[in-house]
Amino acid sequence: MLIRVLPYCGGTLALAGALLSPLHWLGEHLFTFHMIEHEIVMAVSAPLIVLARPVGLLLWGLPRTTRHAAGSVMRMAVVRRAWDWCIGATNATIIHGVAIWAWHVPVLFDAAVTDTLLHRLQHLSFFATAILFWWAIVWRSDYGASAWHLFLTMIHTSILGVLMALAPRVLYVAQTQTAMDWGLTPLEDQQLAGMIMWVPAGTVYAAAAMTMLALWIRHSSGRKAQNA
């Protein structure tokens, strides 16, 4: 039980730290901190919560009537088929990737910064699609496939980070408009945000991919030894 409680608590605290702590306020004023917030949601909180598999515990925490209603919905054939489709490794990787790239289109990102409802929708889509992605990686795919999809995610998010970091002009006008108050130019704020997506976030995906690759090699070697 402890092995499930610890990652769940860690993931929940990371999520709260990203969305409810002063980090969220800082993210409204500096693109750099906004990017840190997003990466914590997608690359720290989501995988930790997925490792805990807390669905059963969360259901038992609901009132009895609500718990039974939620269980009935989850057992519906259409819901189960939709869930199974969404947590296929390829589908989950694409869904998560589309969410990341779509929300980083400058016009959409700036719109989310200036509209509270859109901002909440942005965070929800990042977290929800990250849950699908990490669930597919951890619980539904073999180690080799998981390593491959983690590597792909590292590549495309790093490319997005590079585009932001090396852009010759400011792309996110609304997000960077208060950067001067913090001693940064708008372009410097954007460059730092891109670097965070490029290097630290890319390192998380790379480390996870290397872990899965090592497990795949170990599993393959053990299977060959058994067949020898």
Image (cartoon, rainbow, N blue to C red):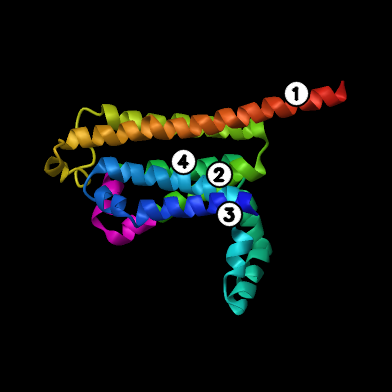
Mark nearer the N terminus (3 vs 1)? 3
Q: Which residue is mark 2?
A: 134
Foreground disc of the pair 3, 2: 3
Q: Residue furthest top?
A: 228
Residue 212 place in picture, x, y as percent: 61, 32
Mark nearer the N terminus (4 vs 1)? 4
Q: Which residue is mark 3?
A: 5
Mark nearer the N terminus (2 vs 1)? 2
Q: Is residue 122 visible?
A: no
Given the image, on which type of amino acid does mark 2 rest?
Answer: Trp
Circle 2 residues within 10 Å: few <14, some 14–19, many ≥20:
many
Indicate left or right for 33 with 93 as reference.
Answer: left
Give the CA distance from mark 3 to mark 2. Answer: 18 Å
Q: Which residue is mark 1?
A: 221
Report the disc number at residue 97: 4
Helix, strand, or loop for circle 3?
Answer: helix
Specify the segment rendered in magenta.
106-122
Image marks 3 and 2: residues in contact by CB distance under 8 Å: no
Circle 3 residues within 10 Å: few <14, some 14–19, many ≥20:
some
Give the residue at x 19% y 31%: 169
